[in-house]
Image (spheres, grey):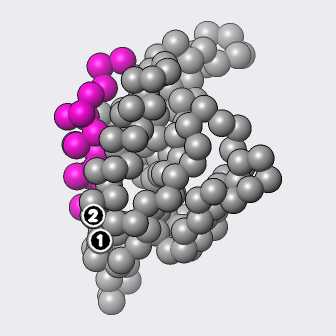
Amino acid sequence: MKVVIQRCNKAFVTVNKKKIGIIDFGLTIFVGFTEGDNEQTVDYMVNKIINLRIFDDENGIMNKSIIDVCGSVLSVPQFTLYGDASKGNRPSYFKALKGLLAEKLYDQFNNKLQQYIPVEKGLFKSEMLVNLENNGPVTIIIEK
């Protein structure tokens, strides 16, 4: 499992000209899965995200978590996180987990994350337009 986390002031996803996920201050998280990922992988990632201290405290030091700042998450499925362009110029996505298992893990990830913080979602297996105002910028990549 790989996530790209971006701290944002606001973000939204549009599918077929309709906004389906809108957040104010919080995190935009791009989420990808690979072979071997399971519920334990999801649990690890959720725990890491909710405790990640990437928000400023009163002294301007990144010392607060998404829970501490009462932020929200926009979760966006992105199988291309497992794209491999090491050979040739066209990425291969053979490492990306396919189909129903990836969708099941994505749903588990969002449901577990939602136990701690508000979560809005992109649409699995859809062409999306993602609009976000990056804050910092702060971008963190985590892979398990």
Residue at left 63%, top 61%? 12
Which residue occupies the extreme right position in the image? 17
Residue 142: x and y in percent read: 36, 43
Residue 32, horizontal then vertical, whole percent: 46, 34
Residue depicted at x 68% and y 10%: 88
Residue 42 in the magenta stretch? The answer is: yes
Residue 47 horizontal/vertical position (percent): 22, 52
Instruction: Kindly identify the amino acid type of the residue bearing the numbered disc 2.
Output: Tyr
Could you tell me what secondary structure mostly forms the magenta stretch? helix
Question: Does dot 2 land on a helix, a strand or a loop?
Answer: loop
Q: Where is mark 2, residue-wise?
A: 116
Q: Amino acid at mark 1?
A: Ile
Q: 144 or 116, which lies in front?
A: 116
- Residue with the mark numbered 1: 67
* Other-residue count near label 2 (Cα within 10 Å), few / some / many at <14 / 14–19 / ≥20: some
Please give the range of residues in magenta. 35-54
Q: Is residue 13 left or right of residue 37?
A: right
Looking at the image, which residue is at 34% across and 58% down? Answer: 114
